[in-house]
Image (cartoon, coloured by chain):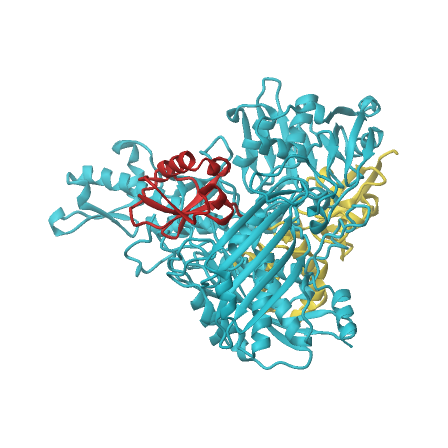
């Protein structure tokens, strides 16, 4: 199981939980599981999210492997100037 | 792509300052920018813009314009379809108003004619009937229930109740218990701030040359930060296949985020399709100000608690950003970055994005961060003043470091904030004496930095020189940096490498030149492409020598046997290998395609001394020093250039620049005379100190450097002014009339 | 409005063109003579990207009419280098990274050359005030001022 930290405004979709646990080996599985288990997250996931894995921000890399002890943080999809 | 384990490597080319490959073209006037291209039979395109801030377009009569001699095409929204994708529809609506003019300067029609004079005359003949609607340009007013609604039904599901429909999204970040945190504080300060919208202010107005042929093929030349993005947007809007629209990026005369979308390109394509002729559109400066991306303006509340010895116990911010007439997500980045510089047990930020009758916000260097960090750094500074603490020591005490849980969630890896603060503390600037009406200000700054989609094709020419094809427009010397990294990896001299930027049919998709990503991502892809080419070359030499591929290594531009056991062979140089490539298997190349991740975050610290003239309210900057972590500075001149240029844009934001709207909702200062960007005589030298804390996510340790330097100047100058005259303003810009008023009120 | 026939000299070359009475010198240079080194950043004389010399005087070519070139001597960025030999200002701008995007560079070079002809040994402050009409949004001016100083020293033979 992977622990995922959810940002504040999405916590209404996770019954207020700051962290949720899902069974996933990579980002694709993680996003799919999140959308299934917490349907309230689905609109945001479809709009785009980034994921931080052990402090490193990934924008779209589905097949990034997640270890069981990895720190995973869901973040909005971001752009720069 | 991890940092090379042999990071104690001695660089030969990286870190030097060779001349940029496009230098001669640019000092002789030969470089071709957006407005410099022509095509046979070319027409001139001009755009008619709304004189109202908010109005229903009841009808547009173009018949008189079409009848004018020399006019070859007129287009309105009726000439475009309705894209399924909402974000594409927004882009299109911003290029040509669909039913409603949403801001002063919103495009409503366009003409193509034989000459500019005829095109201008034709615009006057277009009759638009408007029904003028109430408008709103202020962020706080726009949020209140009962405010004029800019666009209906655009709010996301995450917006709390109680706001007007103009509030389109809400976000929330943070961790820890604020109540507990504030209870531990000896002093809590809560302040409200506003910042004005500013424009990127690139000196080159948007320009493009579009050519559509009757068989459906199109060519587009334009100044853009991303030709592939332009192709995606234009192909969708025009209903074309991507393969049929070739977009070539001209040399670009500045962008800073403002050239990451399209404004005139779909219009020029539509005019070209309708007229059957190439059409060139060049914006005027007035159009650039009215209808292209300024940044957001903001209204913010920040509350911070601190102990008597300078430990921050809790921090909280509410950010309200207006991004013009279309939804945007900039406030999310502001809310995440606001407290990124601090190691906090309790932190909470909320952000709202708001629609107003202003032009659609476009990215501007670290979008969303400068204003949020300005507010935070102002309150931190005020706490230091109130508690009698040294502002640099307080920041050192609270600075984020490796292992800090960041305000936006993830735990930081190796970062350079502490080292940057230490460098500032040790610098002579920090202890230089100050005179009357003078003050010293300090602020930290932060930006995420991004990677993204990147392709590089590296060809070993038959004479052993190297051609690199990449897809990211060079805004500030990146071709030099890319050539340097290729030369470094291949072990060849810098002047044997030439890097060019490809059109959209010559390379796979590349993300826009944004997010401080080019030297990081394109550099990373170039290094990997070079390694692939080296592998090919070593393989060829192994066959010549009749030994295993593994027994051949690459060093100093030559293939060599890996050791005594591999055999006794004379090393073969890249020139020798290239010369016989047709005998050994054909042309030699390396390429690399990646969606790069691992762009390390970047921190900076700025220090400024100012003198405020109590008679005029004018702020003079006496000394300015920028400290920033670059990971590894590939071409230090251009790293310094980013630090200096970003700082000066931030200085303009702090002191002078602002979008000024009248009660009528019209923009009052759409020109460089009234929208005053810093000029040479406003400024001192901008001193720079580059720190190099290697980014673990890049083979050479490179971090993006372009955006972070615009972040700290806002609070640096506000803090300096506060210490110079004992008056702290809570709004930007701190223009002389505002400061003078504050000085007089104080008496 | 009928076009007018104008005889002038551009970068030392005798040049003739026709233009409308209300056409700017900048448009003439760019659209009729193919000299696109001068840029239009604002069209109102605020940015200096279109700087050229008219009878030795530094002007914004967007504020000069094409017809005013009659009998005059025009100098543009295209006339700075002698053949393949760059002007010291040009070379030092490259060597000292005094340009990033480069759009303001032609105007700044023309303006800096005009300064050094009047004042071969300017202070930093004199350079900053002379170039105050030439906007640069990329560099923060620091490296531009330094490159002008280095070129000036070189031209003085120092």
B551 left or right of B221? left
Kindly indicate the quadrant of the structure image that contains residue C109: bottom right
Viewer-side residue, B630 vs B571: B630
Please state the total of marks drawn on the protein image: 0
Q: Where does the image place residue A27, in percent across and percent down from the top left? A: 37, 40
| Residue at (69, 23) in percent of width and height | B79
Kindly indicate the quadrant of the structure image that contains residue B435: bottom right
Q: Where does the image place residue B535, in percent across and percent down from the top left? A: 27, 41
Rendered view: A15 above or below B396:
above
| Residue at (69, 78) in percent of width and height | B437
Kindly indicate the quadrant of the structure image that contains residue B372: bottom right
Rendered view: B123 above or below B290:
above
Any part of residue C147 in sight: no
Q: Where does the image place residue B323, in percent across and percent down from the top left? A: 64, 46
Q: Which chain is red?
A: A
Q: Which hue belongs to chain C? A: yellow
Q: Which hue belongs to chain B? A: cyan
B475 left or right of B58? left
Rendered view: B180 above or below B496:
below
Q: Where does the image place residue B266, in percent across and percent down from the top left? A: 64, 30
Viewer-side residue, C80 vs B718: B718
Q: Residue furthest right?
A: C1
Rendered view: B296 above or below B7:
above
Any part of residue B670 in sight: yes
Q: Residue furthest top?
A: B215
| Residue at (78, 37) in percent of width and height | B50
Tell me the quarter of the image containing the C terminus of chain B.
bottom right
Viewer-side residue, B267 vs C129: B267
Viewer-side residue, B181 vs B102: B181
């Amino acid at each position: 199981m992977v622990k995922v930290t959810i940002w504040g405004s999405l916590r209404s979709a996770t019954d207020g939980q700051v962290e949720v646990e899902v069974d996933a080996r990579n980002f694709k599985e993680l996003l799919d599981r999140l959308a299934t288990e917490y349907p309230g997250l689905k609109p945001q996931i479809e709009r785009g999210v980034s994921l931080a894995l052990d402090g490193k921000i990934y924008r779209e890399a589905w097949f990034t492997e997640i270890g069981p002890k990895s720190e995973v943080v869901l973040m909005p999809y971001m752009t720069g100037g | 792509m991890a940092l090379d384990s042999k990071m104690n490597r001695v660089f030969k080319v990286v870190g030097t300052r060779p001349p940029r490959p496009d230098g001669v073209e640019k000092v002789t006037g030969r470089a071709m920018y957006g407005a410099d291209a022509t095509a046979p039979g070319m027409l001139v395109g001009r755009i008619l813009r709304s004189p109202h801030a908010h109005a229903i377009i009841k009808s547009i009569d173009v018949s008189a314009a079409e009848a004018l001699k020399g006019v070859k095409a007129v287009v309105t929204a009726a000439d475009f379809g309705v894209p399924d994708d909402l974000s594409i529809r927004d882009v299109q609506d911003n290029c040509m108003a669909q039913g409603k003019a949403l801001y002063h300067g919103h495009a409503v029609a366009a003409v193509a004619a034989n000459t500019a004079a005829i095109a201008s005359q034709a615009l006057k003949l277009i009759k638009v009937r408007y029904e003028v609607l109430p408008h709103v340009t202020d962020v706080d007013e726009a949020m209140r229930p009962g405010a004029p609604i800019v666009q209906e039904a655009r709010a996301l599901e995450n917006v709390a109740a109680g706001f007007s429909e103009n509030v389109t999204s809400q976000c929330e970040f943070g961790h820890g218990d604020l109540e507990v945190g504030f209870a531990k504080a000896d002093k809590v300060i809560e302040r409200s701030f506003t910042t004005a919208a500013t424009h990127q202010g690139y000196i080159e107005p948007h320009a493009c040359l579009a050519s559509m042929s009757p068989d459906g093929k199109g060519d587009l030349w334009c100044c853009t930060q991303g030709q592939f993005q332009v192709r995606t947007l234009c192909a969708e809007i025009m209903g074309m296949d991507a393969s049929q629209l070739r977009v070539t990026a001209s040399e670009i005369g500045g962008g800073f985020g403002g050239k990451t979308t399209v404004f005139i390109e779909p219009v020029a394509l539509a005019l070209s399709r309708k007229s059957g002729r190439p059409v060139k559109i060049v914006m005027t400066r007035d159009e650039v100000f009215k209808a292209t991306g300024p940044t957001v303006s903001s209204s913010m509340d920040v509350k911070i608690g601190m102990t008597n010895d300078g430990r921050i116990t809790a921090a909280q911010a509410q950010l309200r950003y207006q991004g013009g007439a279309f939804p945007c997500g900039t406030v999310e980045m502001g809310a995440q970055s606001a407290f990124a510089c601090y190691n906090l047990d309790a932190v909470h930020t909320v952000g709202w994005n708001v629609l107003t009758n202003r032009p659609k916000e476009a990215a501007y260097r670290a979008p969303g961060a400068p204003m949020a960090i300005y507010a935070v750094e102002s309150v931190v500074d005020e706490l230091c003043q109130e508690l009698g603490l040294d502002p640099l020591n307080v920041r050192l005490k609270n600075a984020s470091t490796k292992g800090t849980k960041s305000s936006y969630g993830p735990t930081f890896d190796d970062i350079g904030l502490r080292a940057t603060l230490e460098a500032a503390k040790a610098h002579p600037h920090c202890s230089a004496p100050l005179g009357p009406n003078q003050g010293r200000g300090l602020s930290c700054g932060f930006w995420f930095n991004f990677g993204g989609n990147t392709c590089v094709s590296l060809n070993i020419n038959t004479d052993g020189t190297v051609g690199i094809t990449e897809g990211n427009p060079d805004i500030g010397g990146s071709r030099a940096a890319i050539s340097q990294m290729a030369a470094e990896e291949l072990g060849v001299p810098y002047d044997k490498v030439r890097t060019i930027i490809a059109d959209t049919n010559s390379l796979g998709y590349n993300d826009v030149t944004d997010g401080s990503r080019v030297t990081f991502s394109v550099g990373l892809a170039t290094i990997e492409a070079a390694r692939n080419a080296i592998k090919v070359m070593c393989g060829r030499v192994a066959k010549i020598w009749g030994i295993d591929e593994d027994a051949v290594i690459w060093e100093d531009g030559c293939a060599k046997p890996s050791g005594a056991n591999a055999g006794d062979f004379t090393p073969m140089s890249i020139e020798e290998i290239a010369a016989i490539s047709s005998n050994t298997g054909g042309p030699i190349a390396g390429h690399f395609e990646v969606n790069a991740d691992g762009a390390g975050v970047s921190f900076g610290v700025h220090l400024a001394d100012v003198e405020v003239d109590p008679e005029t309210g004018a702020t003079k900057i006496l000394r300015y020093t920028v400290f920033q972590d670059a990971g590894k500075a590939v071409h230090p001149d251009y790293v310094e250039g980013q630090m200096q240029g970003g700082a000066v844009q931030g200085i303009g934001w702090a002191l002078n620049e602002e979008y000024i709207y009248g009660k009528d909702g019209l923009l009052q200062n759409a020109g460089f005379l009234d929208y005053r960007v810093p000029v040479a005589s406003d400024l001192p030298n901008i001193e720079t100190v580059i720190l190099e804390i290697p980014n673990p996510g890049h083979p050479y340790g490179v971090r993006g450097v372009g955006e972070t330097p615009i972040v700290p100047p806002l609070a640096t100058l506000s803090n300096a002014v506060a210490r110079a005259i004992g008056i702290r303003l809570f709004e930007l810009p701190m223009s002389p009339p505002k400061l003078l008023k504050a000085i007089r009120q104080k008496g | 409005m009928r076009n007018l026939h104008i005889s002038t000299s551009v970068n030392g070359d005798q040049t003739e063109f026709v233009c409308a009475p209300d056409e700017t010198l900048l448009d003439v240079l760019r659209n009729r003579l193919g000299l696109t080194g001068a840029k239009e950043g604002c069209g109102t004389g605020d940015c200096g990207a279109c700087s050229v010399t008219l009878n030795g005087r530094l002007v914004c070519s967007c504020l000069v009419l094409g017809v005013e070139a009659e009998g005059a001597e025009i100098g543009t960025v295209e006339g700075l280098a002698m053949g393949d030999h760059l002007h010291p200002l040009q070379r030092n701008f490259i060597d000292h990274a005094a340009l990033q995007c480069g759009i303001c560079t032609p105007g700044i070079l023309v303006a800096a050359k005009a300064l050094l002809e009047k004042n071969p040994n300017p202070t930093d402050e004199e350079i900053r005030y002379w170039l105050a009409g030439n906007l640069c949004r990329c560099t923060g001016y620091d490296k531009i001022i330094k490159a002008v100083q280095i070129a000036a020293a070189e031209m003085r033979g120092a």
